[in-house]
Image (tube, helix red, strand yellow):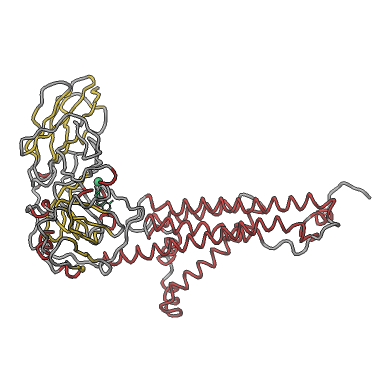
Amino acid sequence: MASPTPTDLDDDANAPAPTHPGLTPPLGALSGVIAVAAALGVGELVAALVSPDSSPYFAVGSWVVDHTPQAVREWAITTFGTSDKLVLFVVMGAVIAIIAAGCGAAERRRPPIGSVIIIVFAVLGAVAALGRAGATGSYMLPSILGGAVGVVVLRVLIGMLDSDSDATDSGTADSVAAEPDSARRAPVSRRFLLTAGGIAAAAVAVGALGRTMLAGASRTIADRKAILLPTPADPAPPVPPDADLGVPGANRFVTDNVDFYRIDTALQVPHLTTADWQLRVHGMVDEEITLSWDELLAMPMTERLVTLTCVSNEVGGDLIGNARWLGVRMTDILDRVGVQPGSNMLLSTSSDGWTCGTPVSAITDNRDALLAIGMNGEPLPVEHGFPVRQVIPGLYGYVSATKWVVDWEFTTFSRAQAYWTTRGWSATGPIKIASRIDRPSAAEVSPGDVVIAGTAWAQHVGIAQVQVRVDDGPWQEATLAADYSDDTWRLWKYTWPATSGTHQISCRAIGKDGKVQTSENADPIPDGATGLDSRTYTVT
Ligand SMILES: Nc1nc2c(c(=O)[nH]1)N[C@H]1C(S)=C(S)[C@@H](COP(=O)(O)O)O[C@H]1N2
Ligand SMILES: [Mo]
């Protein structure tokens, strides 16, 4: 009977499994495991770049540890002892592998269930990472990128399996008797196996790289946490309350570490420890020395507030910050090694090979050039140079502020060139006088008194005056905040009786040397931007 009615028997007869016994190894499940391995590998690598605490695997692991009932925890500790964490990770790995296999099998049979499960776990990883102490939005990146890679890998592998079985099915009618199954399927399966194997190997490599980087990062973090900063022999003068303006939305006199601008060429932040760290001092010196962390800490400590600025700062830009630095006066080290009279440049090098050329005179002329270990009462944040960096008042960062500094060579400007000098920037970089409008930030204001607030700086010269101009009117005196020191910025405010219409507000600073900030516009390259900051406000 040639009934077209499908029956259970017909279905079975068409299903590949019974027709080709042995050809249905759990390739879907394998695809799932490889996809999730790729997701975890990418997650670890991205976490190494973002923060060790953002690793989805460890964030979820920590969440499990934090939420394990006390009884289970005690049982685990008594049973496994100090291996309890290892056991946790092995168990987590096994659970993940089982879920991953399920994802793959599900994706093959009923797409996109497997992809959806991966996305759900990526979201869980992101939430767990966000729950870690000090987490920022970037902590979601490892989970998001890992999850995305996992879904793509799963789709690619399952897609290959599907096209493999299509090819098998279409070949069935005419060639099933002519060729043995293995010969017919082999080339297609090889393509799948090569891809799957390649992705699996890449996942392991990427994950291992991430782990290696994370291990270094967490060693540095633990080392940094254990540091107790010494008390300065020469503390910074206290900051008077009126160094701030008390105007809502105004810049703050001291910049918090988390808000401090960061500029460097390091794609990956160098992870040194105090034990690794040493400073080799050589070149045109009477005696070469190598300073260790302990030797540095044994020297008298000076504390100063210094405003750091980047030469790349545009007019009105925010590549500037003011912090309380703790460190050893660089001159003390110069005295120890005896710099030879012919040397006019200190060529400093960071652990990642970045170089910086500083005039020796800017270290010996009695300004507070510091080899700093502390920033606002904490050990240097890793991204701001842990464990040791330079801070020199009055010079742009690219010629003064070497982070992760490990090498000092005394040489001459005619003999040596530093990183940015070979790229078109000036060999010397004294900071140019500048001023900036910080508030109101909105472009629309109401008529009546509007408080304009801003910041002015001329490090190592000092700010004597700030003036404000409305449209093309006369320059008017702004009110200055307390004058803390010539090496720090100075905040200012000006009350503007705003009238309807569109108005342009400009500001300019005058240094203690009498120099007036120029209105002439210059680009940051080669030695710092000039021009006046101005804002347009619509008064309605
Ligand atoms: N090792 C190293 N140190 C560096 C840099 C760098 O690229 N590498 N950039 C410099 C520049 S251009 C500036 S402006 C300051 C910025 O310091 P901060 O990131 O702590 O604000 O660091 C300086 N120190
Ligand atoms: Mo800079």
Asked whether residue 479 is in view, the answer is: no
**Total number of numbered discs in the rendering:** 0
- Quadrant of image for the C terminus: top left
Q: Nearer the viewer, residue 234 or 15?
A: 234
Horizontal side of 462 relative to 58 (left or right) equals left
444 or 316: nearer the eye?
316
Q: Could you tell me which residue is drawn at 28 percent across and 54 percent down?
A: 354
The answer to whether one can see residue 494 in this image is yes
Residue 483 lies, in percent from the top left, at: 7, 43
Res 468 quadrant in image: top left
Q: Is residue 240 above or below residue 530?
A: below
- x and y percent of residue 421 in the render? 25, 46
For residue 520, above or below residue 57: above
Residue 425 placement: quadrant: top left
Picture coordinates of residue 458, whole percent (x, y): 12, 41
The residue located at (19%, 63%) in the rendering is 282
Residue, far right: 1
Frontmost residue, 525 versus 192 = 525
| Residue 213 x/y as whole percent | 39, 62
86 relative to 414 in the view: left or right: right
- Left or right position of 198 against 299: right
Say which of 440 and 51 sits in front.
Answer: 51
